[in-house]
Image (cartoon, helix red, strand yellow):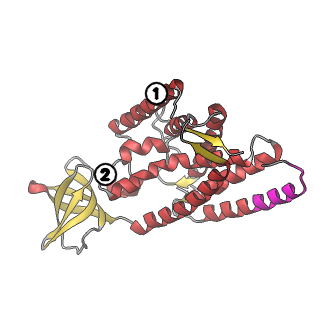
Amino acid sequence: MKLKPNRLILGIIFLSMLYLLCYNYASEGYYQDNSVINLLTGYSENQILLYGHVTDIYKDGFEIYNVRDKTAYHVKTNLKISLDTGIYILGTLNSNNEVIIIKMMKFKSEDVLDVFFRSLFASIIFLTVFLRYWKFNPKKILIIRRK
Amino acid sequence: MPDWIAHVLVAWSLTTILGFRFKQFSQSNSAIVIFGALIPDIYKITLLLDSFGIYMHDFLNPIHLPIGSILIAAIISLFFVNRKSIFLFLIMGISSHYALDLLLFSGGMEIFYPFSPLKFQIGIISVTDFNITIVSIILALSVYLAYKKYNKKNYFNLV
């Protein structure tokens, strides 16, 4: 296995630039999940936006594990939600991590699956075309053109 | 975003049409352009991470911005011998990806980030619209038939 030093140096430089770009983007708070734009309307400081799956069901509501801050919240509601349902919740936070719902939206998991399967099909097309003309040489760590 | 079928077929059609006139756009290089067209959607790995309870959307979103995609293309091109030409073919694929994504109505993209935070999008197609996929299939079929016809007559050396 042989890797030319200039490729390695360039690779480290590009990876570092990519990391800095991503870090800067995340720290500046630019990201806005387009699927929760409607929920975010009217989002103020005393409100909380939760994003995750239902992990437990109670008589007065359910528990959601918020993936953003890796914390479980007790959501008080009369709505019947089944276990493992993915949801976005805009709510007000009370003591003991209790949340009162203002707005709630379920994940459209069927859309995600649809995109996944179509992308899988396209991946097969891409790999078929790509591997017809190119191959990986593990000794040189290079992708070379087939003759 | 249009699905990968649309991105793959539009990139292939584009390079095959250019291949009628320019011999640099061979089928092997069109595979690189298709590769480039899928680079911005490496960001979709966040969907997989979501299922493991790892939220990385805000950190990895720049991959789906031109500057991030260009850096990924630069990294990928290091694995090829002719890295400059491969980089340019990857950029061409990336451009076709953003050209399609700009047609959508999905909240906009910060295409000039980090120079400008302004979001742009033409907004004529919804994210779930299948029409763009159907149009890309018709386009690819037409190009394929033309490609076959010209190849048969040996007018152009496309491969």
| Residue B75 pos. (x, y %) | 52, 35
Task: Look at 40% across and 56% down and name the residue there.
Answer: B47
Q: CA distance from mark 2 to mark 1?
A: 27 Å
- Which stretch did the figure color magenta? B142-156
Q: Quadrant of residue A129?
A: bottom right
| Residue B65 pos. (x, y %) | 50, 41
| Residue B86 pos. (x, y %) | 64, 37
Task: Look at 58% across and 65% down and name the residue there.
Answer: B130
- Chain on which label 2 sits: B
Nearer to me, A108 or B21: B21
Q: Give the residue number, with chain letter if any, for mark 1.
A: A13
| Residue B11 pos. (x, y %) | 66, 51
Neighbour tally class for label 1: few under 14, some 14-19, many 20 plus, Cα within 10 Å: some
Q: Is residue B144 magenta?
A: yes
Task: Look at 76% across and 58% down and name the residue there.
Answer: B143
Q: Amino acid at mark 2?
A: Ile
Neighbour tally class for label 2: few under 14, some 14-19, many 20 plus, Cα within 10 Å: some
- For the question of whether residue A37 can be seen, the reply is no
- For the question of whether residue B110 can be seen, the reply is yes
Nearer to me, A138 or B31: A138
- Chain on which label 1 sits: A
Q: Give the residue number, with chain letter if any, for mark 2.
A: B54
What is the secondary structure assignment of the residue under circle 1?
helix
